[in-house]
Image (spheres, rainbow, N blue to C red):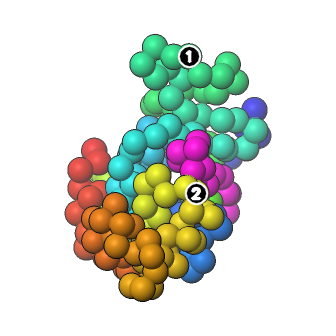
Amino acid sequence: MIEKRKLPTAKSIFQLRISIQETDPEVWRRVLVPGTIPLDKLHDMIQDVFGWWDYHLHAFNIGESRFGLVDVDGIEEEDEEIDEKGVKLHHLVGEDDRFTYEYDFGDFWVHDIEVESVECVVDSVESKELTLRRAVCIDGANARPPEDCGGTSGFEEFKVVMANPRHEEHESMTEWFGGPFDPTRFSLAQANAMLQRTR
């Protein structure tokens, strides 16, 4: 179980740095999220800020506990997995904590999440500071891997093929992906436009 200790209050803003393991150059995003965000919505936020398509299963590993979708289409997940729905972030972690988010148990994209800072927010007559209502992306770098590209090794091969127009698989890979691929591409505006969908 998660260690009992003093955790942030509900009215807090978490600054998270989220990076995909074994990507070079590193694919990462920095976001601000309300402390009250439940894990199921944090999942949605991660999908949006990276541009994933939410095609696959996922799970959070926090301390000794694993959170995820306990019942998907009537299929019961492992007994030790805790239902993520409604479990709020500020009840689980604090500043300097680290945890992971796994997406796609086939390609197995593991995201390292670091709580860089926690700002407690005052909501009173004397202060106009209010709790953040939705996630905001403030920084990031590089394009995430394509869905179903075969994990880290497949992603590396994909980049090699896409960078070489003379490669025998370049044309077919470009058609499969739907166009050219720029591994350095990251749009802060696009990331935040996607986040507007998460409520």
Neighbours of disc 2 within 10 Å: few (<14), some (14-19), many (20+): some
Examine the image and state in which quarter residue 92 appears. top right
Q: Nearer the viewer, residue 123 or 156?
A: 156
Q: Nearer the viewer, residue 86 or 104?
A: 104
Residue 151: which disc?
Answer: 2
Tell me if residue 108 can be seen: yes
Q: Residue furthest top?
A: 74
Label 1 is placed on what type of residue?
Glu
Give percent across and percent down for residue 90.
Answer: 54, 46
What residue is at 45 percent from the left and 45 percent from the top?
43
List the residue tagged with mark 1.
76
How far is the residue under mark 1 from the one under mark 2? 26 Å
* Residue 12 on the magenta span: no
Label 2 is placed on what type of residue?
Gly
What residue is at 51 percent from the left and 16 percent from the top?
75
- Judge from the rendering whether residue 96 lies leftward or rightward of residue 86; answer left or right: right
Say whether disc 1 or disc 2 marks the residue closer to the N-terminus: 1
Element class at badge 1 = strand
Q: Residue furthest front?
A: 168
Give percent across and percent down for residue 10.
Answer: 47, 45
Examine the image and state in which quarter residue 64 appears. top right
Above or below 3: residue 83: above
Magenta range:
95-110
Give percent across and percent down for residue 142.
Answer: 45, 77
* Residue 102 on the magenta span: yes
Element class at badge 2 = helix
Of labels 1 and 2, the one closer to you: 2
